């Protein structure tokens, strides 16, 4: 975690007001968290750090792309990522991070490490299902898609097999409703 020192902000020495920090995130960042879901990452994180007399306001903005494998075809592709996260840091008796938008640091604390917040922001910005854009517009040609198409059930066959069979006792009861 020695590489995470770059994400530590000593806020005691900062003047009251707004400060801006920029971070370039690549795959090495995610390896520090033992996260290997991305083939590659090229992300820029901008942090607007506003120091106020009694609290700190942090606004994280992430923008860039990650290279991931498609959940349907397993083909790698670049997925655009863009998201924002706001965090308020207050000071209290003891450390408390129960609320995801409010962090309480003990009095006397002089620095904050933002690596975990950047990591969570990026990982949570990735959609649950990653689909290659070529699948959505029909331009991707791959062996896996051809095999899926070949093995998928055809509509004509399923309609012939779905002849509805009913119990003859119910048919007799239904006649009572229509007969007058």
Image (cartoon, grey):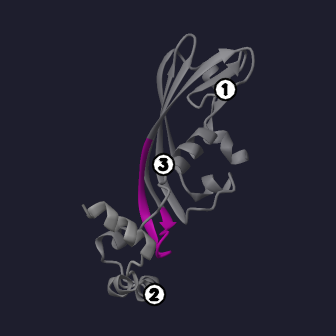
Residue 62, image x, y percentages? 45, 44
Q: Could you tell me which quadrant the C terminus lies in?
A: bottom left
Answer few, some or many: residues within 10 Å of disc 1's Cα (few below 14, many 20 plus, some between 14 and 19): few
Question: Could you tell me what secondary structure mostly forms the magenta stretch?
Answer: strand
The structure residue drawn at horizontal position 73% and vertical position 23%, both measured from the top left corner, is 95
Furthest-front residue in view?
A: 180
Q: Upstream in the sequence, badge 3 or badge 2?
A: 3
The region drawn magenta spans 67-83
Q: Is residue 171 above or below residue 7?
A: below
Going by the image, does 70 lie left or right of 155? right
- Decide: marks 3, 1 in contact (CB < 8 A)? no
Q: Which residue is mark 2?
A: 151
The structure residue drawn at horizontal position 38% and vertical position 72%, both measured from the top left corner, is 171
- Observer-side mark, 1 or 2, equals 2
Please, what secondary structure does the residue beneath circle 2 have? helix
Between 175 and 40, the one lying in front of the other is: 175
Please, what secondary structure does the residue beneath circle 3 have? helix
Q: CA distance from mark 1 to mark 2?
A: 57 Å
The structure residue drawn at horizontal position 47% and vertical position 76%, both measured from the top left corner, is 73
Residue 37: which quarter of the image?
Answer: bottom right
Going by the image, does 36 lie left or right of 165? right
The structure residue drawn at horizontal position 39% and vertical position 80%, both measured from the top left corner, is 162
Residue 125: mark in rendering: 3
Residue 111: mark in rendering: 1
């Amino acid at each position: 975690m020695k590489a995470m020192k770059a994400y530590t902000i000593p806020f005691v020495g900062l003047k009251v007001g707004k400060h801006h920090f920029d971070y370039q995130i690549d795959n090495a960042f995610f390896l520090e968290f033992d996260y290997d879901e991305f083939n590659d990452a090229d992300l820029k994180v901008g942090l607007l750090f506003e120091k106020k007399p009694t609290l700190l306001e942090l606004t994280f903005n992430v923008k860039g792309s990650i290279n991931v494998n498609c959940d349907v075809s397993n083909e790698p592709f670049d997925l655009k990522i863009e998201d924002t996260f706001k965090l308020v840091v207050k000071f209290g008796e003891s450390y408390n991070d129960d609320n995801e938008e409010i962090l309480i640091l003990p009095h006397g604390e002089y620095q904050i490490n933002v690596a975990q917040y950047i990591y969570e922001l990026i990982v949570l910005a990735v959609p649950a299902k990653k689909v290659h854009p070529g699948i959505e517009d029909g331009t991707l040609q791959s062996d896996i898609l051809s095999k899926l198409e070949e093995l998928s059930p055809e509509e004509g066959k399923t309609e012939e097999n779905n002849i509805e069979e009913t119990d003859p006792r119910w048919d007799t009861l239904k006649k009572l409703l229509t007969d007058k």
